[in-house]
Amino acid sequence: MQSGKIKSAPFIILSAFLFFYKPIMAETKIDSYFRYMPSRSVDAQSGKVEIMEADSECSYGFKAFDKLPFKLSLDNTYIGIENTTGVKLPAHLVGLTTDIETTLPIFNVDKTYLSLGVSPSFYGDDWGFRSSGFRIPSRVFFIHQPTEKWTFLLGVAFYPDFENEVLPILGFIYKPNDKLTFEITPKRPNISYIFNDKITLFGEGGSSFGEFEVTKDNLKNVVLRYRQTHLGAGIKYKVNKFIESSLSCGGIFGRSLKYRDNSLGEVDIKNGVYTELRLEIKI
């Protein structure tokens, strides 16, 4: 059976509704970045690959019944690919994720909480989304805060139909003083230092991984895996109490684009550099 195509219009409408409807919202946050990776040669074959990533997440936090915290978010991902190798790759990969997360106190366990999240998502290679590209990643982890300076995370994330279906969630946040913060968490590990009221210096790392259902020649719903790891440093500027922008650069490693069916080809991109521009808005 041929999979149907799901258009993104309902998600755009939902995002607009939540943005303008704020009576119960405690916080609205928009986090967008553009990351550019110049053209680099690949291993074991001729040709080069140039990649740019763009991502925008809009999230809304509120308390149900004035007690139970919830966060709703909508995330839009784009990966543009310029490819001159012999392996045919799509010009762009796209992902659309909705997410709901809540954090619950654990009875009789002091300063310990349970966080639950589920992320219905579509992954494809065009601006529509086929039902076969639908996945539901989820996560469950504990948060323990023994002191105001320390916070620990421990749990697991589930990625059904991915290459690695279960991954650990391990991390901590350490804030020794008002200026310095170590946020070593899976989503965006970083170390930041508040230089003054306007400027924050930071070092950060992280990785991107995804599996997208794409069309290759006459084959549809072929899974293409994308991986990369990056490490860099930058500066953040506080425009006002609502807006912050940052610029960072560094090295990028372990990049690959591989079809799940190995006979369709793979591209291992040599290490290179990246530049990232990020904008954060809190209302």
Image: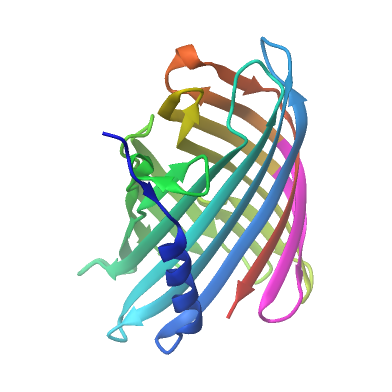
Quarter assignment of residue 109: bottom left
* Left or right, residue 33 beside residue 221: right
Residue 218, above or below 249: above
Residue 98 visible, this orientation: yes
Tell me if residue 85 comes above or below residue 222 in the rendering. Answer: above
Q: At x 70% / y 23%, what residue is drawn?
A: 270
Q: Please tell me which residue lies in front, 44 or 235.
A: 44
**Quadrant including the C terminus:** bottom right
Question: On the image, which quarter does residue 44 sit in?
Answer: top right
Q: Is residue 81 left or right of residue 214?
A: right
Residue 50 locus on image (x, y percent): 72, 33
Look at the image and say whether residue 152 sits in the magenta stretch: no
For the stretch drawn in magenta, the main secondary structure is strand
Relative to 215, 189 lies left or right: right
- Name the residue nearer the viewer: 178 or 230: 230
Q: Is residue 99 above or below residue 63?
A: above
Depicted 269 relative to depicted 214: above or below:
above
Q: Could you say where residue 57 lies in the image, as x and y percent from the top left? A: 54, 61
Q: Can residue 186 be spotted in the picture?
A: no
Q: Position of residue 106 (x, y in %)?
A: 24, 66
* Image-based side of 205 in relation to 275, left or right: left
The percent position of residue 116, horizontal first and vertical second, equals 31, 59
Q: Residue at x 34, y 39 (%)?
A: 132
Q: Residue at x 67, y 63 (%)?
A: 180
Residue bounds of the magenta highlight: 232-251
Q: Identify which residue is drawn at 31% across, 35% down.
A: 2
Could you say which is closer to the camera, residue 123 or residue 36? 123
Front-lying residue, 117 or 177: 117
